[in-house]
Amino acid sequence: MTAAGGILTVDLGAVAANYALIRREAAGAEVAAVVKADAYGLGMRPVAQRLAAEGCRTFFVADAREGASLRDELPEAVIYVLNGLFPGTAALYAKACLRPVLASMAELEEWRAEGAPLPAALHFDTGMNRLGMSEAEADALAQDPSLSAGVGVSLILSHLACSDEAGHPRNEVQLGRFQAILARLRPHFPEAQASLANSGGIFLGPGYHFDMVRPGVSLYGGNPFTGKPHPFRQAVTAQARVLAVREVAPGDSVGYGATWKAAGKARIAVLAAGYADGFFRSLSSGTSEGISGGRTGEKAGESGGRVYIGGGMAPVAGRVSMDMAMADVSHLPEGAVKRGDMAELIGPHISVDEVGLRAGTLGYEILTALGARYMRRYIEDGTQSAAANGGKA
């Protein structure tokens, strides 16, 4: 039995299966992997190693520190840095063989000044209005080859703003703009790959695939679509230990602010997980008063979070604090939940996207916010392969 208050299980087999599914969907295009933010909270090192074993050769990170760390693990991989080139850091990128995704003429000029012909990506804005050079700057590069002289342009990319909605008109607008940019630049950079599609974009059809697709959240089992199911296997299970089971008298409150009061005699499970562990404070729930029979059941948790414990769902009771959350288990059989049990926060019964919805956010944010206090273990299709900190479940 581990002394950890929470266990985070990452199924690397599920990550590999999701990668294989995307390769089938995007047949003919290279499938890269976005492993920024510690592989969306799952652990960049083991995830990237598993994807590399599946044949992934190109990876995307957010900044150079992530890239340097990944380079230590995968010496032969192609690694692009999505946030571009920070001022005065070109030598660091070059030393770690990182390829900046250049999003401005200033970045392009600084990369050129590094001297040796170095590979990089060119990022063009087609409607996200975040990072990326303009169509006018694409014209300038096409008309004046000296602006990019000495840079080995290996990739031309843009990023979709609304790929989670297949019918959104901006998808076709961005596709058309990207095609126009490529038409201008391809004669000057004939060896460069082209990439537009993120996780959702991959499923907009082959016209969005170009030479490379860049899945992120879909690799980790998150839903890249709005309002519809997805085909990906969930790769994460998060569990929190039951610290105590308390009897609460009718009218008594639970947690900070006394926002939850028992309508009748209640049983409360105290869990070793709070917002420091990525179980958001917005998963808190209010009073149970008014629930018939004094039993709160699942109904009280509709406006807040819930956990799976003792063979059933149990709503969060009261405010989630930094290190603890409480769940109302009054409706479960006596003795079904006891001290030392584990409650599922994310897993086969509660998807990461459901947690995000109940917290008023996205599954992306839930994954990337998973705290460092979990004992992490890595499994292959249900078989434990490694525990990151040497602990045993």
Image (cartoon, rainbow, N blue to C red):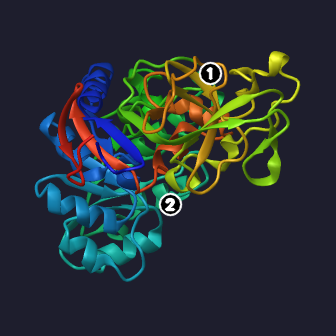
- Which of the pair 340/184 is nearer the observer? 340
In the displayed structure, 119 sits above or below 208; it is: below
Which is more toward the observer, 241 or 198? 241
Q: Quadrant of the C terminus?
A: top left
Which tag, 2 or 1, sits closer to the chain's start? 2
Which amino acid, by three-letter code, is at mark 2? Glu
**Residue tagged by mark 1?**
227
Q: Secondary structure at mark 1?
A: loop
Q: As drawn, is 149 to the left or to the right of 270? A: left
Which quadrant would residue 245 be assigned to in this image? Answer: top right
Residue 172 vs 377, above or below: the answer is: above
11 displayed left or right of 72: right
CA neighbours of label 1 inside 10 A, class few (<14), some (14 to 19), many (20+): few
Residue wearing tag 2? 137
Quarter of the picture containing the N terminus is: top left
Q: Position of residue 51 (x, y in %)?
A: 21, 39
**Circle 1: residue type:** Gly
Residue 358 in sight from this viewpoint: yes
At a point 41% along the width and 32% down the height, the residue shown is: 218
Callout 2 crowding tier (Cα within 10 Å): few <14, some 14–19, many ≥20? some
Single out the mark in the foreground, 2 or 1.
1
Q: Circle 2 — which element?
A: helix
Residue drawn at 74 percent across, 21 percent down? 299
Q: Position of residue 140 (x, y in %)?
A: 47, 61
Tell me: 168 left or right of 243.
right
Residue displayed at 75% across by 24% down: 296
Can residue 212 be seen here? The reply is no
